Image: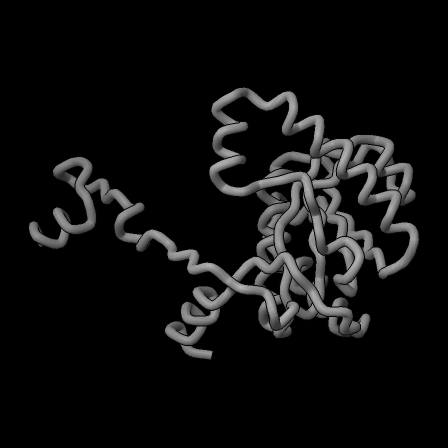
Amino acid sequence: MSPAEHLAFLKSRRSRRYYSNADVPLRVVERILEAGSQAPSGANSQPWQFVLIPRGPHRQAIQEMCAVADLHFHETAPKWLKDWLKHHNVSTEKIYFDKAAWLLAVFSQRDLPYWLPSVWLCIANIINQIEAEDLHTVVYTPTLGKPFCELLGVDTSWSCQALLPIGVADPDEHMQPRPRIPAREKTLIFDDEGIATWEEFEAEA
């Protein structure tokens, strides 16, 4: 894959919330997790733990726990955040718990240096590998504490950073355009003359 092809691949990725009932083989999921495991981490500490949850009745308990956490988050959010959530149509409804072939819980070991950026670099690798497998996901970050660890049999000193559905997208989902701001508009260049925008720097060069 050329650099241009890789960039085009990244630009094609979309978060998906609706899934078909199609299965995803465990060997494919293993590749996805291996991609996550290749992420850089502070002193190679690899402060992550994965829990895979196939379809089944156990997902109901997870969904109920997430619903309680989400409701609390929405009810106690400051007004500016409530307005933001409403404007972006962020609700407590999570419609993919039943259909997605897999639900992946990514836990972090928070007593290690650099754990937060390390775990999120891992999650980024996972997201991109899911797309490379022609599958889809959406990043969900519920605030779940020790009861969630206990439910999944994970040491309570770890914390869940994200729940990621992994599955085949529902072809009938209508995707709204989600354009990205060009990188140059998000970039300042600090040179001998001080701070300049991308365009100012190019004009002076």
Residue 166 x, y percent position in the rendering: 71, 62
Q: Is residue 158 visible?
A: yes
**What residue do we see at 47% from left, 65% from top?**
10
**What residue do we see at 41% from left, 68% from top?**
7
Instruction: Answer above or below: position of 176 versus 198.
Output: below
Residue 152 x, y percent position in the rendering: 88, 44
Work out whether residue 39 or residue 54 is closer to the camera in this orientation and state it. Answer: 54
Q: Is residue 87 left or right of residue 186?
A: right
Work out whether residue 93 or residue 46 is closer to the camera in this orientation and state it. Answer: 93
Residue 72 x, y percent position in the rendering: 71, 26
Which residue is farthest bottom? 1
Residue 75 x, y percent position in the rendering: 65, 24
Q: Is residue 204 left or right of residue 72?
A: left
Q: Is residue 24 visible?
A: no
Q: Quadrant of the C terminus?
A: bottom left
Q: How many marks?
A: 0
**Residue 165: which quarter of the image?**
bottom right
Work out whether residue 2 or residue 68 is closer to the camera in this orientation and state it. Answer: 68
**What residue do we see at 84% from left, 56% from top?**
53
**What residue do we see at 68% from left, 58% from top?**
37
Q: How is the model colour-coded?
A: one colour
**Residue 154: which quarter of the image?**
top right
Instruction: Answer above or below: position of 6 versus 204.
Output: below
